[in-house]
Amino acid sequence: MIDMLHQDWFVDAEGRCQPRPASRPWDLLQDHYYLHQFLSDILSILAHAPNEFDQWDYLPQIRRKVRQLILNSYWLKTQRAEPDPKSGVAVITLYDEIGYPLTVQNVITAPGLVTSIHNHGTWGVVALLEGQERHTFWQHPPGSDRITPIDQRTLNAGEIISFMPEAIHQVETLGLTPTVTFQLYGDTQPKARFQFDPETFTAKPF
Ligand SMILES: [Fe+2]
């Protein structure tokens, strides 16, 4: 896995996708990095944030931990399923309990699948484990319910993309085989998550 791409990306609130320095794989290699260790590390990092709205400020540290996980956890890559024939998606929840402040999942998508245009209402980090996908980013000017496309990026296995809570994207699964992604999100803030109508580009709660 050390020969995969290792590029990090950051998408800001205006939908600009910028490259960020990635940790060197040989600095992160270790014998085991279990999911429970990873989750404890993430919660320790987030404990430094003064409040939930500032958690995204810790995305560089979180991305480094995600890279450590995808480099050292063979188990993570075995957590997969065939995409549902109807929806084209399979979601495997890797950990959850009532009140848990993180969403941790592997998501498998079928070739050709195009998601809705959406934000997540919280920070997010997505690592491509297998396959290829194209993200289109949109801008949502304050006070307006209209959005406009602003940027696009094709990601390959080994790349990690991170999002501010307001970042809006749409994802298309490329290639001939399903894409497998590891996805980590913070707590979605009430009334902060939107899906956008592709015809009118207007927002509705999601
Ligand atoms: Fe998304």
Image (cartoon, rainbow, N blue to C red):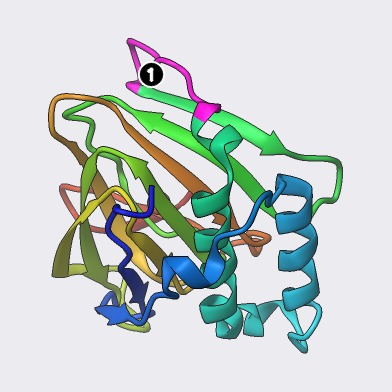
Give, as a single range, the part of the protein colored magenta. Answer: 78-88
Predominant secondary structure in magenta?
Answer: loop
Indicate the position of residue 15 as horizontal and vertical percent values.
Answer: 28, 74
Residue 140 falls inside the magenta stretch: no
Indicate the position of residue 161 as horizontal and vertical percent values.
Answer: 37, 64
* Between 54 and 180, the one nearer to me in the picture: 180
164 with respect to 140 (left or right): right
Can residue 173 be spotted in the picture? yes
What residue appears at the point 46 percent right and 35 percent down from the top-left corner?
Answer: 107
Can residue 123 be spotted in the picture? no
- The residue where tag 1 is placed is 83
Pick out the residue farthest to the top: 85
Residue count near mark 1 (Cα–Cα under 10 Å), binned few <14, some 14–19, many ≥20: some
What residue appears at the point 59 percent right and 66 percent down from the top-left corner?
Answer: 65
What residue appears at the point 27 percent right and 79 percent down from the top-left corner?
Answer: 19
Indicate the position of residue 113 as horizontal and vertical percent values.
Answer: 23, 31
Q: Is residue 68 above or below residue 197?
A: below
